[in-house]
Amino acid sequence: MRYQLYYWSGIQGRGEFVRLALEDAGADYIDIAREQGDDAILPFLAGERPGALPFAPPFLKAGRTVIAQTAAILLYLAPRLKLVPTGAAATLYAHQLQLTVTDLVAEVHDTHHPIASSLYYEDQRAAARQRAEDFRQQRLPKYLDYFEQALMRSDGRHALSRHSYVDLSLFQVMSGLDYAFPHAMRRLRRKRPHLCALAARVAERPRIAAYLASPRRLPFNEDGIFRHYPKLDDPR
Amino acid sequence: MRYQLYYWSGIQGRGEFVRLALEDAGADYIDIAREQGDDAILPFLAGERPGALPFAPPFLKAGRTVIAQTAAILLYLAPRLKLVPTGAAATLYAHQLQLTVTDLVAEVHDTHHPIASSLYYEDQRAAARQRAEDFRQQRLPKYLDYFEQALMRSDGRHALSRHSYVDLSLFQVMSGLDYAFPHAMRRLRRKRPHLCALAARVAERPRIAAYLASPRRLPFNEDGIFRHYPKLDDPR
């Protein structure tokens, strides 16, 4: 099966969670918009293609199946890529954790876009500073504590009983947070040793290390979800 | 199986999507916090109970299984309650639609809390007016068009090929939006006849009608997700 990933070509964004799973598994896939341009995405969003209607990218085409929503794509892919322990309970718990990653990612996005996705960051800076402060002080510690606790309830090294796509997603979240909020993360990392160690181990997985060193891994940038605006981070 | 639903007792909130599925199916369930108080939720959030760790309510206990995240709970319940067509493709597409409902609900919440959940609405009114205007003008029409189109790609009467939990969720969304944004919705409803007709039909399903007339259906209120603040609606 050659999977077709549809996601905007200029950012890691939500597509990166799918890309990391495909890369870690050594799956055969094509990153459509990077090959054919972002316009290849539009007919699907306009309902001009058969199959499930996506609200937004990323979506995945697997044969004639179209699947949208990052967490649903991973739910579909994980057993096929052997990236989740077998069994209904593990499948569901992994998915629940991934949905909480989804929630965190949405909150990260809203630190720089608290008013409207349709406006520039520069047009909502005052609100962004307030939202980002609450995020760093209240929400982010709560999410990090949650995932740290989830690791400790498992074997301390994985979100589930063994390596899974959830670990890849947690690596991505930690990487993005380090990029966006370096000062806040220096403070927050101290009390979450399991999460930090997991992220470091994932980065060293051979296929992930090769991917991160390749041009396929775009750098974080200020068009994506994790953006580094110094005024949204802790003061030095 | 007697299902145990854990959700804050004073609001419909995200728990309502689960409640509607249980009610429509005539399932045996207990709404724990309404019987025992909200404190019954806390040990689960503190990690003091076995099973999957919830980040937040709602969560469902089914025997020894604990499931959090509204959409994941519905993914689990739907085949058991016969609220989704059989088959992997339908299961996944229903879930994808539900996850888009989840995204819409999060954006509704942020119309009144664009800065911080930890602050009162009264402390973020200026930002709320801006965010709500963008929501009414940009985001809400886009979501409603998406679901309208999804119905038209199906049989025009259901999100999937037959009645499912997604229809129940769309009913709930339309009800909440009518409550929160009556003026905007009067304008927006005109171009989404399939969605409006679906919501009306769901309200007439015998078990749903009985539920809506019962004291178990809490009224919408200004502690929940769908809140009616006239300044966040279209001007008259």
Image: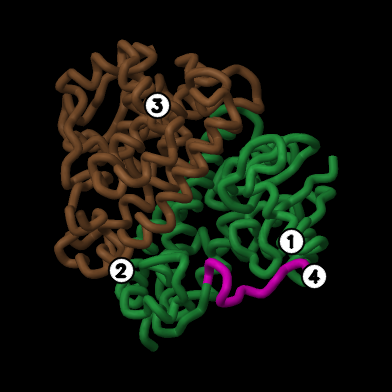
Chain colours: A green, B brown
- Secondary element at image label 2: helix
* Residue at x 48% of width, y 22% of height: B164
Q: Nearer the viewer, residue A191 or A232?
A: A232
**Which residue is identified by label 4?**
A214
* Residue at x 53% of width, y 26% of height: B156
Does the stretch in magenta take in A218? Answer: yes
* Residue at x 48% of width, y 34% of height: B72
* Residue at x 21% of width, y 66% of height: B124
Whether pointer 2 and pointer 4 mark residues with C-beta atoms closer than 8 Å, the reply is no
Q: Which chain hosts label 4? A: A
Three-letter code, disc 3: Ala
Q: Which chain hosts label 3? A: B
- Secondary element at image label 4: loop
Foreground disc of the pair 3, 4 = 3
What is the spatial separation of the Cα atoms under label 3 and label 4, in whole angstroms? 51 Å
Q: Which mark is residue B68?
A: none
Q: Earlier in the sequence, mark 2 or mark 4?
A: 2
Dots 3 and 1 on the same chain: no
What is the spatial separation of the Cα atoms under label 2 and label 3, in whole angstroms? 41 Å
**Badge 1: residue crowd in 10 Å (few <14, some 14–19, many ≥20):** many
Dots 2 and 4 on the same chain: yes
Q: Which mark is residue A208?
A: 1
Q: Which mark is residue A134?
A: 2
